[in-house]
Image (cartoon, coloured by chain):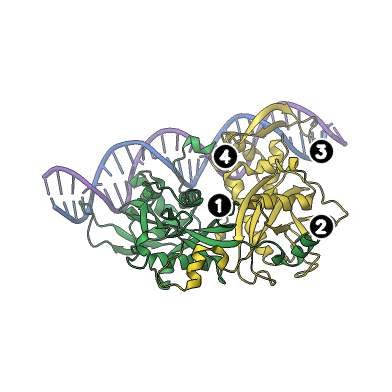
Chain colours: A green, B yellow, C purple, D blue
Amino acid sequence: MRKTGGMSESEFLAGYNPQAYKPMAVTADVVALTIRDGRLHVLLVRRGEPPFRGAWALPGGFVRDDDLQEAAERELAEETGLLPHDLDRVHLEQLGTYGKPGRDPRMRVVTVAFLAFAPWLPDPKAGSDADAAVWTPLTATRELAFDHAKILDDGLERARSKLEYTPLATSFVGEEFTISELRAVYDAVWEEQLHAGNFHRKVLSVPGFVESTGMTTERGGPRGGPRARLYRKGDAKYLHPALLRPSREDEIR
Amino acid sequence: MRKTGGMSESEFLAGYNPQAYKPMAVTADVVALTIRDGRLHVLLVRRGEPPFRGAWALPGGFVRDDDLQEAAERELAEETGLLPHDLDRVHLEQLGTYGKPGRDPRMRVVTVAFLAFAPWLPDPKAGSDADAAVWTPLTATRELAFDHAKILDDGLERARSKLEYTPLATSFVGEEFTISELRAVYDAVWEEQLHAGNFHRKVLSVPGFVESTGMTTERGGPRGGPRARLYRKGDAKYLHPALLRPSREDEIR
DNA sequence: CAAATAGTGTCTCTAAGACATTATTAG
DNA sequence: CTAATAATGTCTTAGAGACACTATTTG
């Protein structure tokens, strides 16, 4: 892993024994996204200790003797009061790792950021210090501690992009859902009003995106309209053909 | 960052002071890809120390007081003899982070993997221990140390995917290149023979993918054919419309 | 009833891919 | 000369998007 020619003794030892290098703290932070009232929300916590005491931040904590993924699940469960059972319905994927020196004023901390998508999560419980954790609409931009604003931005871009090529949107709705509910997810994440008719035909034409349950909703919409058919997630890992965002010229160059 | 309700004193301290948790070693490993003789090659080094002594591995090393990206650049430069100047022509991006307990038998090591694309890199210099670093064609599959086989796989999939949506292929060719050279990159990475005529028209039709230099090659191909026009990289960040792989049904589900 | 919504039909335009064709060069 | 390759042309078909339209439900 390290070269042995022409290196100092400490470098040689380091190649042999990792403890010869200054160790670092490794944390897992989570960008947890859900949709409430037709708008995308992110889970934020208010820091109770310095640095950045009182500032909003992504939930996170130190990686212990578990896997990185498990550490992220643990932090998510702690802040949301989610039971292990509920975690099955939450999509969790690695987003990226942020380790610029100085990003934490206390010491060198490298954080592995994760992205979580959930159809619905309970409000963080009051009591303990969980009243300092809230689902925040993304439109209400806040200052975030550390480099969490950058991590959140990267997470949003990843989410928007994955809606195009994967059936990820089904992670934001319940077990059974209507095409309209699915469209509401795209509308919220992309912040665009998609055309209802074209979207409907498109979703049904992508193999494996959704499969019919044969059922319909009990009632029509709150302001009228027929009952909608219910679908569940299909077996496709990728959407083909993809469901591309209406691209804006300025984002291409 | 951590909750304070109902936690042990050590946990409270850890929330305040990261050093209360057991530190970990952080390394940067590089999946460096280039194209030689029309085939994709990856840079591998032979380990001179245990564990996995004598086994092939991805180049990598410990992150020091620099940024993760800088650590990756340093490792790449060390193994290839690349000068800082040459690094400008190398595309380097973060691939993912691998930290399963036990992936390094010595201690807990979390590695941040990077993906590098280069048009051409010198053979690792003989002498020192660089003779243990070689460009290896991907067809010649080897056993790799640690979880490097998995990292390499992930890197390959990332590379194949990014050729579709980004002008990344231009990172594998020289400053000025012909459409045929560009097609050879796609052929090598995707392991498919693309149709020359359709590829040609497609590349020129994507805005900002390539721009003409007005020049042509000095000679035709080695076995005949007209001189080819020369192009350089355009200003597009994303290819639109994308250049999709002929998708195989079994990879979608 | 009117308004809203689910779902379908139709038309146009773009783009992908199969294939053919012409021009230019090496040997 | 022949073989190979660059570059362009033609045709077919799939798919995206604009828009219209029908059916069904709520209030």
User: Judging from the image, what secondary structure is the residue with disc 4 in?
Assistant: loop
- The residue wearing badge 3 is B223
Mark 4, other Cα within 10 Å: few <14 / some 14–19 / many ≥20:
some
Is A187 on the left or on the right of A23, as rendered?
left
Q: CA distance from mark 2 to mark 1?
A: 30 Å
- The residue wearing badge 4 is B237
Nearer to us: label 2 or label 3: 2
User: Judging from the image, what secondary structure is the residue with disc 3 in?
Assistant: loop
Disc 1 residue type (three-letter): Arg
Is there a contact, CB below 8 Å, between mark 2 and mark 3?
A: no
**Residue positioned 45% across, 60% down in the render:** A49
Task: Identify the image quadrant of the N terminus of chain A.
Answer: bottom right
Nearer to us: label 1 or label 4: 1
Nearer to us: label 1 or label 3: 1
- The residue wearing badge 2 is A7
The number of numbered badges drawn on the structure is: 4
- Give whichever of B225, A140 is nearer the camera: A140
Q: Are marks 2 and 1 on the same chain?
A: yes
Nearer to us: label 3 or label 4: 4
User: Judging from the image, what secondary structure is the residue with disc 2 in?
Assistant: loop
- Estimate the x, y position of residue B135 in percent, counting from the top left: 78, 54
Disc 4 residue type (three-letter): Lys
Mark 3, other Cα within 10 Å: few <14 / some 14–19 / many ≥20:
few
A182 over B90 or under it: above or below: below
